[in-house]
Image (cartoon, grey):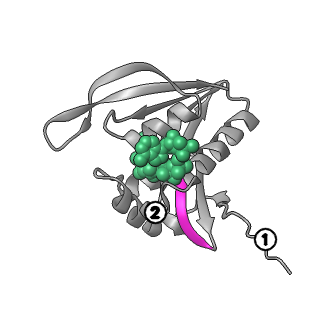
Amino acid sequence: MSAVLKPLEFDFRPMNAADLDELVRLERAAYPYPWTLGNFRDCLDAGYSCWVAQIEGRLTGYWIMMMAVGEGHILNCCVAPAWQGRGFGRQLMEHLIDTARAHNTGFLFLEVRPSNLPALGLYRRLGFDEVGRRRNYYPADQGNEDAIVMRLDL
Ligand SMILES: CC(C)(COP(=O)(O)OP(=O)(O)OC[C@H]1O[C@@H](n2cnc3c(N)ncnc32)[C@H](O)[C@@H]1OP(=O)(O)O)[C@@H](O)C(=O)NCCC(=O)NCCS
């Protein structure tokens, strides 16, 4: 008898208020300048597209996107540190892109730090192009850091 190992995949479900504490815990583990609980709550209250990704029932990633008149703005996209580098970021973004397409979104925008090489690599891999820079957009250890603005046509 041979056992067939199925690759691990995220289960996606809409985010809800009961997730907030766990989201903040994960966010703090993943980002040097994390969102607050209020940032997540505001996104839920505003009705943005907010999804969590689970592995074996554990919250392991999430993404948040604001959609309006045919365009989507990606506000957050995160995989728990212990699960990074194993293809889950790609799964997360593919779910986001499928969701955007299902809402007739024509293109996506996002901002990313030039120093965030894993995120830049992921977005380029998915076909995002750099379309601009916002000077001194992010707080950083010494002063501020620019944001690279990226766009994907769907
Ligand atoms: C960015 C992030 C979501 C990527 O998730 P991940 O699960 O590590 O990514 P994956 O394993 O799916 O890799 C997908 C692609 O990303 C790129 N990538 C991943 N890790 C990378 C690294 N350390 N350096 C360069 N590129 C990398 C590669 O192109 C990779 O594709 P490939 O393996 O086919 O070459 C994850 O690092 C993360 O959550 N970081 C903290 C939060 C964050 O910075 N979010 C983005 C805010 S703009």
Image position, residue 19 (x, y; %): 52, 66
Residue 83: say if magenta: no
Total numbered labels placed on residues in the image: 2
Where residue 138 sits, quadrant-wise, is top left
Segment tinted magenta in the rendering: 57-62
Q: Earlier in the sequence, mark 1 or mark 2?
A: 1
The foreground one among 40 and 25 is 25
Q: Which residue is mark 1?
A: 4
Residue farthest along the bottom direction in this orientation? 1
Q: Main secondary structure of the magenta part?
A: strand
**Position of the N terminus by quadrant:** bottom right
Q: Dot 2 surroundings within 10 Å: few (below 14), some, or many (20 or more)? A: many
Q: Which mark is residue 17?
A: none
Residue farthest along the right direction in this orientation? 1
Image position, residue 134 (x, y; %): 32, 23
| 93 sits to left or right of 2 | left
**Position of the C terminus by quadrant:** top right
Q: Which residue is mark 2?
A: 23
| 102 sits to left or right of 88 | right
Residue 61: say if magenta: yes
Residue positioned 64% across, 73% down in the render = 56
